[in-house]
Image: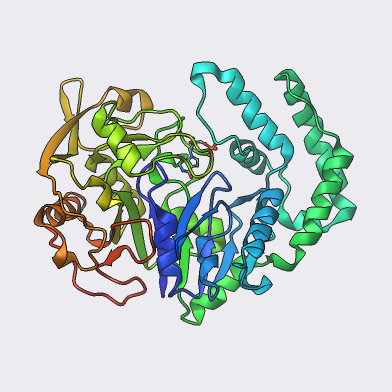
Amino acid sequence: MPSVLVVGAQWGDEGKGKIVDIYAGRADAVVRFQGGNNAGHTLVVGGEKIVLHLIPSGILHGAAVCCIGNGVVVDPEVLLAEIQGLRDRGRWPSDDCLLVSESAHVILPCHRALDQAREARAGDRKIGTTGRGIGPCYEDKAARRGIRVGDLLHPGTLAAQVASLLDEKNALLRHLGAEPFDPAEITDGLLAAGERLRPYVADVAGRVHAWLAAGRNVLFEGAQGTLLDLDHGTYPFVTSSNTVAGAACPGVGVAPSDLEAVVGITKAYVTRVGEGPFPTELHDDTGRRLAERGAEFGATTGRPRRCGWLDLVALRTACRVNGCTGLAVTKLDVLQGLPEIRVATAYRLDGATVDRVPARAEDLARCEPVYETLPGWDEDISAVRDLADLPAAARGFLDRVAGATGCPVVLASVGPGREETIEVAAPFGRRRSGPRQDG
Ligand code: IMP
């Protein structure tokens, strides 16, 4: 079972794109299983900055087949623009390198309009969505009236599907003061997009089963993060899909026993975009320093990210929910130069000590972090490639993370470049030495 799953262990933006990009170099296939173009992966390859929203970041390696599983919601315009963008930059390997599940649901312009109109009306009750239509598309999927990628290849039935969907959506849009859509125009656009996507439409589940059976390396790529999970995140300030590792099963059509290793990605601190509780958020110079050094602006919306100290309570919860077998700690270099580093080891809520993330966002918002202070370091660590060469304080920080979560650190990222990485244990079963576990 040579499969590795990469999952965000915080509120998204943990740097999954870079880790997937590294692991994809050894994978035969990279498979996305949830979310849509609300995700944004920024990759720096050979000094060139590339942002991907929908296509798995493995595309830049060329050798791996990139798959968009049935659990993903696909905006055809965005997907086609992303393919074209990679072609224009000479980074499109071949048409064989992308497969899109025929069962993935399609984001329509009315989903985007609805997302934006609702957020505009919500005032201070808004979620802070990316405005990409993700929630409304998943709503239609659950309501069994969604349009799927395979439907775009069937002109005989698509018009009726669109008309029935828009009948309801247009009424809703008018009610919210937004413009309705013309069913014929939308159908024509979808059919044209379907023709252009036809070469990529495939039975992704069948292909993944065949690869796994043949012992090929399959990398499952999660989007967003555990605390944005529809069930296990800080509801309602979450995204509209399950983002946890287990979501790969329905999102691709594989079994839990097909998932061999689960690598949770965490920053060395925490960021969050959009609304919602964030116990360790910093509103001071340290927070601003993290934002500046970490270039913390959303890859999808350009919004500034909220920054705070590493929250080991949330990380422990994420490791448990996902069954993480290893952690990749990103942006370790951003902590350089801080005289001391804090990590939250517990919360105080109504006079009691809490060691897990409360289910209610209102309760989490009232939690006060209990901090432990660790020594900082001044040395530039961006050239370090071996754990043993890190300053003692940086190694101690990684040991503390491993000790608090019970999860070994398998990788630490010390800069945005592909090569600015300390790999402690390789994915796909080729293990090297790991850091101390007791912290
Ligand atoms: P939606 O997914 O656009 O509906 O947004 C819901 C919430 O999830 C908002 O707080 C977004 O900022 C957040 N979100 C969605 N995708 C990402 C992501 O890829 N990284 C970080 N936050 C995200």
- On the question of residue 357 being in view, the answer is no
Position of residue 415 relative to residue 209, above or below, is above
Residue 237 appears left or right of 108 = left
- Is the N terminus in the top left, top right, bottom left or bottom right quadrant? bottom left
Q: Nearer the viewer, residue 339 or 27?
A: 339
- In the rendered image, residue 281, in percent from the top left (x then y), is placed at 29, 30
Residue 57 appears left or right of 363 = right
Image quarter of residue 412: bottom left
Please tell me which residue is depicted at 17% across the width and 41% down the height of the picture. Answer: 338
- In the rendered image, residue 382, in percent from the top left (x then y), is placed at 26, 59
Please tell me which residue is depicted at 63% across the width and 31% down the height of the picture. Answer: 115
- In the rendered image, residue 62, in percent from the top left (x then y), is placed at 55, 73
Q: Nearer the viewer, residue 419 or 373?
A: 419
Image quarter of residue 38: top right
Residue 115 appears left or right of 313 = right
Position of residue 171 relative to residue 74, above or below, is above
- On the question of residue 181 being in view, the answer is yes
Please tell me which residue is depicted at 73% across the width and 19% down the height of the picture. Answer: 175
Total numbered circles = 0
- In the rendered image, residue 44, in percent from the top left (x then y), is placed at 45, 59
Position of residue 105 relative to residue 87, above or below, is above
Position of residue 150 relative to residue 269, above or below, is below
* Colouring style: rainbow
